[in-house]
Image (cartoon, grey):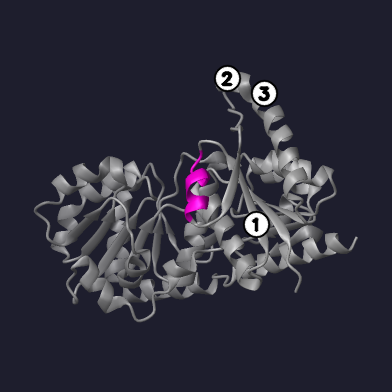
Amino acid sequence: MHSIRAIISGGGTGGHIFPAIAIANALKKINPENEILFVGAKGRMEMEKVPAAGYRIEGLWISGFQRKLTLDNLSFPFKLISSLYKAARIIKTFKPNVAVGVGGYASGPLLQQAASKNIPCLIQEQNSYPGITNKILASKVQRICVAYDGMDKYFDATKIVKYGNPVRDEMLAIAGKRNDALAFFKLNTSHKVILVVGGSLGARTINQSIEANLKNFADTQTQVIWQTGKAYYQTAVAAAKNFSNVVVVDFITRMDLAFAVADIIVSRAGASTLSELAIIGKPAILIPSPNVAEDHQTKNAQALVKHNAAILVTDTACNSQLWPAINNVLQDDLLAEQLSKNISAMALHNAAHHIAIEVIALAQKQKVQ
């Protein structure tokens, strides 16, 4: 198979960046000679995470347009013109055979310019409700890779392929690791384990709810791995100092071990997270973040809940409803088994590989034209 030159653009959050890196890794696995350039937004986390993964990245001066009147909006037209100009220069220099957008600010100008130069384009939409950038780009691309059913409400059905969200394989290799995980987190072998994750920055509502229920966890002999994020870490350490059943961490370095040892997972409902939870197949209680565009985390969670594949607790009801939801699953093995079975049935495996094949097919088509 001949090598290709691909630009992968987008970012802003881990939910965009890590799927992008997974696609790049899959392209390299298929053919190490494939050349990949990332394009992100200056000052956003992709400018750090992508080089750390071993890839080159160019930054555009671009940010989102705020729905409310702000001073930042005054600079938006200048940022857009600057980004379109720089995107055109990047394309002229790199000469890609294909452009891939994963959502986020930078993918707009890059794919707009690529499409105008007849370079085939593909977008990957992680969520059950598409972001504004992908909605705008949809008419200009040849292929739209999605993770949920019903996306023909937003996109041309003839362009859609459903492969799921690319995930970080190393995080999901959990088979046979329970004993190692118990030792790593210094947990008791005979008591159930709740894994609480609020994302790398933490989640205030989830943290406050866990703190309020530390005695309930102790009374039921339930162990907790509590990932707090940096901002809440010292507060959580102080709150949990008399509870030997609680392990407090600001960031989990070995998510594979955390997933391996967890009996129940409490989490936000980002698209990539839900894809990971489906693949590992553990009972999940989801608290969608209210601070995301178009409330898309709630829509993501509802896509699972309607198949009895997860339990949804709203952010506003978290303080009163999170512990009853956790305890319900703790005390009902049949419910836990059903949730696990149903979420596993929704898993889509090898998404990054399938998307990489689509990227290569578009690139090869462009090369023979």
Query: In the rendered structure, which amino acid carries the disc numbered 3?
Result: Phe
Q: Is residue 167 magenta?
A: no
The residue where tag 3 is placed is 78
Rendered-image quadrant of the N terminus: bottom right
The single residue placed furthest to the left in the displayed view is 242
259 w.r.t. 11: above or below: below
Magenta-highlighted residues:
44-52
Query: In the rendered structure, which amino acid carries the disc numbered 2?
Result: Leu
The label on residue 69 is: 2
Residue 313, how many percent across, how many down?
40, 52
| Label 2 or label 1, whichever comes before in sequence order | 1
CB-based contact (under 8 Å), mark 1 and mark 3: no
Q: How many marks?
A: 3
Residue 53, how many percent across, how many down?
50, 57
| Label 1 or label 3, whichever comes before in sequence order | 1
In the image, 212 versus 320, the foreground residue is: 212
User: Label 1 vs label 3: CA separation?
Assistant: 28 Å
Mark 2 neighbour class, 10 Å CA radius: few under 14, some 14 to 19, many 20 or more:
few
